Image: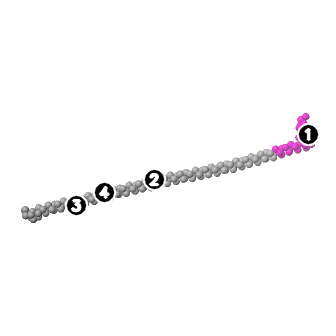
Amino acid sequence: MGKESYDVGGKGGGRERGGGERNRERERERERERERERERERERERLRERERKRERERESERERVRERECARLRERANERERVRERERERERERERERERERERERERERERERERERKGTLRVAQIRIVSQHEKWFVPFMTGSH
């Protein structure tokens, strides 16, 4: 009974001479299979490592893209701020110009006022002179003194 019924030719694992040969062959085959499995596992690990590396590179690229986008947005914000600052500066300059214009207008008004006063004084003086003149000259000429 036992092993002999399964022995289908060749050197079996039974008690016959050289029976261990088949076992050794099976053991070598299992060892080769384990080696192939380890090789496949190493290959899968290399693939996973390449994939992780590609993923890191993609992440790094995404980070660079985000960084460029942020820099671009910061630059645009800075540019808008510079434009607003230039606009505020132009507005301040216009305000200063309006203030200078108002000051010139006030100066012209003071000048006109001084001119009017001078003319008024002249007129008053002329009137006074004429009046003085009339006091003695006109009556003298008309003979009504």
Mark 3 vs 1, N-terminal side: 1
Label 4 Cα neighbours within 10 Å, binned few <14 / some 14-19 / many ≥20? few
Determine whether the residue tagged by mark 3 lies in a helix, strand or loop: helix
- Residues at discs 1 and 2 in contact (Cβ within 8 Å): no
Determine whether the residue tagged by mark 4 lies in a helix, strand or loop: helix
Is residue 130 found inside the magenta-colored segment of the image?
no
Q: Is residue 106 above or below residue 4?
A: below
Determine whether the residue tagged by mark 2 lies in a helix, strand or loop: helix
Label at residue 119: 3
Residue at 35 percent across and 56 percent down: it is 99
Region of the chain picked out in magenta, as a range: 1-30
- Amino acid, disc 4: Arg
Label at residue 84: 2
Q: CA distance from mark 1 to mark 2?
A: 102 Å
Label 3 Cα neighbours within 10 Å, binned few <14 / some 14-19 / many ≥20? few
Determine whether the residue tagged by mark 1 lies in a helix, strand or loop: loop
- Amino acid, disc 1: Arg
Q: CA distance from mark 4 to mark 1?
A: 134 Å
Across and down, in percent, residue 41 comes to 74, 46
Q: CA distance from mark 3 to mark 1?
A: 153 Å
Residue annotated with mark 1: 15
- The quarter of the image holding the C terminus is bottom left
Residue at 18 percent across and 59 percent down: it is 124
Q: Is residue 72 above or below residue 125?
A: above
Mark 2 vs 3, N-terminal side: 2
Is label 3 or label 1 in front? 3
Residue annotated with mark 4: 106
Mark 4 vs 2, N-terminal side: 2
Its colouring scheme is: one colour
Residue at 26 percent across and 58 percent down: it is 113
